[in-house]
Amino acid sequence: MFHSDRRRDQNDRDVIDRLIAGDYADDETGSAIGVATRSLVIADELAGRGHDLVAALGFGRRIAVVSDATTHAVLGHRVEQELGGAFDVQSIVLRADPHADTATSDAIRAEAPTVDAFVAVGSGTINDLTKYASARDEKPYAVFGTAPSMNGYTSLTASITENGHKHTLPAQAPAGAFFDLNVLAAAPKRMIRAGLGDSICRTTAQTDWLLSHLLLDTPYRQLPFDLLEAEEPELLNLAEALMGGDLGAMRVLVGTLVLSGFGTAIVGSSAPASQAEHLISHYIDMLAPADRPAILHGEQIAVTTLTSARLQEAMLAKRPHLVPDTIGQSDIAAMFGDDLAPSIWPEIAGKILSPARADELNDRFARNWDGYAERLGRTFLGAATIEKVLKRAGAPTTPEEIHLDRAFYQQAVGRARLIRNRFTVLDLLDRSGGLAGLIASV
């Protein structure tokens, strides 16, 4: 079941409607594509509908509603009241600004060992914690969004910190995802800007994913980006309207975030929405000074996306020539310390560039680079466009605006490629000798 007042394409049936019905036509394969989420509702007002929305999912009677001190006041209490009576509701209210880590997820599981299902009321952190906890207990979950701040509502993964290393871990899609546009439009402005930041990284993520495919023959799918084809141009023109509380603009943003999450769910990987810009962000999350003020994920992604776009422009301007990797385990230990190094080394070890591989890729560049650059350029918005859209919304565009010393930020850009076995512009520029020279300009 999907309901939205807007209708766009595919014989007057909404893209989300078709995905939930399981009959979205994939142009690449000719096959019908669907998603695991069974119900998705985007409406101006959902007050009074909580019971019916959850009851339609067939969860069983015992429901744990997970929120934090802030989201409980915004919407969690209302959801609990609407579910009460027909369901045995267990209220789990975390402290304000909880951490998305394994300890908190385990605490949620320990507090509700006998429930039939979970309902998350929140945005990024609450959704990830509940998604991960429910998946580990093999119980379904649904989510009521409280802010349009990130694209992970409908994904299959959760961003969870484990032993200090931030991972994108397998989880599950929500059985139901529900968005009250009046609630979302009333969210703090910085959370709306964060959603815009997490949406605009489509361009750099697609370029990096396609780059890896062209160079290394890794899998690539066009489908996640086809899903966003109608929404993204519209969203880029609505920055001011979003910040003004316009519900129509909010509907477009939510649709973009939902479709981005569905794209990752369909391909079974975060790759369509998470590349160099997210590696830089994850490095920051792991190693930023402890006294740094709290920053939203999407705010950070706005800045790192702009950085990635500038790096990609430099990459496309000149054919690279790669040299082999020389990094070893002792280098990783020196950079990350003994606690993090054991989990980081296997990631970089999986993509170390050997002399033979460097020669192979350089030969491929010599034969095909112009064609690669032309194809990559077609996926790309460009740094100037990205910066203009972000500034129109008042979103951050510099390290200083997200409370980072520029020297630390430049270190993050230089080392982020090491924390995950995912080939991006950071690897290409590092191995072609261009990254160090460009860091000063990002």
Image (cartoon, rainbow, N blue to C red):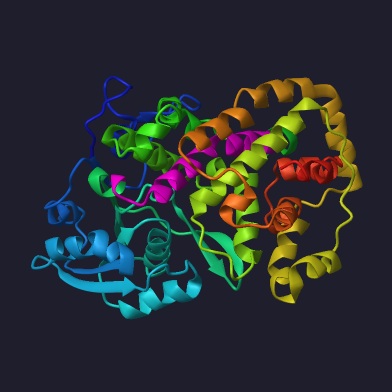
Is 289 on the left or on the right of 99, as rendered?
Answer: right
**What range is drawn magenta here?**
185-213
For the point 77% across and 20% down, the residue is 370
- Name the residue nearer the viewer: 81 or 226: 81
One can see residue 119 in this view: no
Residue 75 occupies quadrant: bottom left
Residue 48: horizontal and vertical position, in percent?
Answer: 11, 53
Which of the 4 image quadrants contains residue 23?
A: top left
Does the magenta-highlighted stretch encompass residue 245? no
Q: Residue at x 65, y 52 (%)?
A: 280
Residue 420 visible here: yes
Q: Quadrant of the N terminus?
A: top left
- Quadrant location of the C terminus in the rendered image: top right
Image location of residue 402, percent across then percent down: 57, 53
Q: Nearer the viewer, residue 102 or 100?
A: 100
Give the image location of residue 56, x and y in percent.
17, 52
Question: Residue at the location (56% across, 33% down)?
Answer: 386
Residue reaching furthest to the bottom: 110
Using the image, determine if residue 290 lies above or below residue 185. below
Residue 210 point in image, percent of width and height:
64, 34
Give the left or right position of residue 224, taking residue 143 as reference: right
The secondary structure making up most of the magenta span is helix
